[in-house]
Image: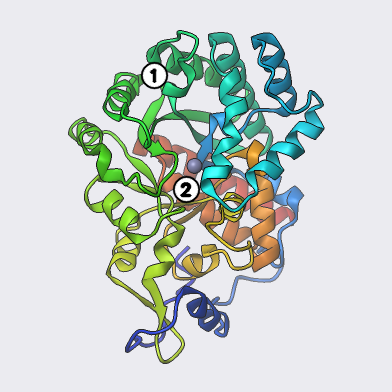
Amino acid sequence: MSRRDLRPSRPPRRRGGNGRDAIAGLGARRLRTPRGPPGLYALGVLTIETIRRAPKVLLHDHLDGGLRPATLVELARDAGYHGLPTEDPGELAEIIRRGADRKSLELYLETFAHTVAVMQTRDAIVRVAAECAEDLAADGIVYAEVRHAPELSTERGMSLDEVVEAILEGFRRGSEGRAITVRFIATAMRTAARSLEIARLAVRHRDEGVVGFDIAGAEAGFPPSRHLDAFQLIQHENFHITIHAGESFGLPSIWEALQWCGAERLGHGVRIVDDISTGPDGQPVLGRLAAYVRDRRVPLEMCPSSNVHTGAAASIETHPFELLRRLRFRVTVNTDNRLMSGVTLSSEFALLAGAFGLDLDDLEWLTLNAMKSAFCHFDERLALINGAIKPAYARLRYAL
Ligand SMILES: [Zn+2]
């Protein structure tokens, strides 16, 4: 994607303003170089059908945030869980979505009480994981890294290892015969104290489909550095780290994640815009941390709807996605929680396409960003990029 060069024409001189002004400045400029011959390239806004057909990559999706509403109802019945507000799947989906959309990460997380309550047996977890793989494949996703905190699924006596094994078994079943690869990221709750145990668990299952380690949960008051021993273990094992950071809390969380904890990717990372201001010529000026993130090509696992629901972004139209994309940060697009936010990866891309005029080239660029940033081995990434993603986009381009 070297056809586009979005650098400012001259270096900005001094700081002032904020990220939102910076995007306004960028919007005033013509940022795209001319494209190829008419008819060969996808001009204009993408349709949801094209987005669904295009191969996509998902790096940030929570297993307990993506249950089918009907499955949640059935599993609740099986488990004798009476906490659901309704047994009508459609109504339930809507109630959960409204419960999540309260502009607070803490309130958003409350909605997980229902899903976690039913993910306490091997059969339930295998089913949820298998349906997850099926749903992602049906949405045109060719590679996904789905995460869960195994410590949340041990209330009825499953061991951490049994939880991971059930998840991996579900992914295997759901992927069978479908053009999708699903890997697992083991998450530790940042509000708890089991991260070292979870880090060891992740490493123990690395050859069976676990590709990395993460911390999640309420961010404010729970900095990544509380879990330094877990991150050090992962680093010593030459394994992979992504950290939820810069979602509900700002730059210090991002800085700690990168410089203390060795995060290779940032979950959300949207608050990195707090380190981007506007120069006197109206052009964006990157502070040292923002420059580091861009220079090192640190992938940002952005989840636009989820960010609006938790209050990390005011709206899709003002989401930092656009500024960061135009500044050529390593931006990726993700779902976070398909049930809670009522989204699919395709619907997220459609939202962004509507707000910012994305076309097929943009979709491919974002997909390649994600595939390059995956935690699976380099040869697997390369095989998917050259064997599946690029040829499919070439075919789509000629079909349009
Ligand atoms: Zn998340």
Q: Secondary structure at mark 1?
A: helix
The numbered dot on residue 370 is 2
Q: Residues within 10 Å of mark 2 (few under 14, many from 20)?
A: many
**Residue 271, can we see it?**
yes
Q: Residue at x 29, y 24 (%)?
A: 203
Residue 269 in the image: above or below residue 209: below
The image position of residue 274, as x and y in percent, is 41, 68
Q: Secondary structure at mark 2?
A: helix
The image position of residue 170, as x and y in percent, is 55, 17
The residue lying furthest to the bottom in this view is 280
Residue 72 in the image: above or below residue 162: below
Residue 5 in the image: above or below residue 68: below
Quadrant of the rendering where the C terminus is positioned: bottom right
Q: Residue at x 52, y 55 (%)?
A: 366
The image position of residue 121, as x and y in percent, is 54, 10
Q: How is the image coloured?
A: rainbow
Which residue is label 1 attached to?
208
**Residue 140, can we see it?**
no
Q: Quadrant of residue 269?
A: bottom left
Question: Type of residue at label 1?
Answer: Glu
The numbered dot on residue 357 is none
Of residue 84 and residue 145, the one placed in the foreground of this image is: 84
- 319 to the left or right of 331: right
| Disc 2 residue lies near ligand 1 with CB under 8 A | no
Of residue 277 and residue 129, the one placed in the foreground of this image is: 277
Q: Residues within 10 Å of mark 1 (few under 14, many from 20)?
A: some
The image position of residue 281, as x and y in percent, is 43, 91
Question: Type of residue at label 2?
Answer: Ala
Q: Residue at x 41, y 55 (%)?
A: 249
Q: Residue at x 37, y 44 (%)?
A: 243
CA gap, disc 1 to disc 2? 22 Å
| Disc 1 residue lies near ligand 1 with CB under 8 A | no
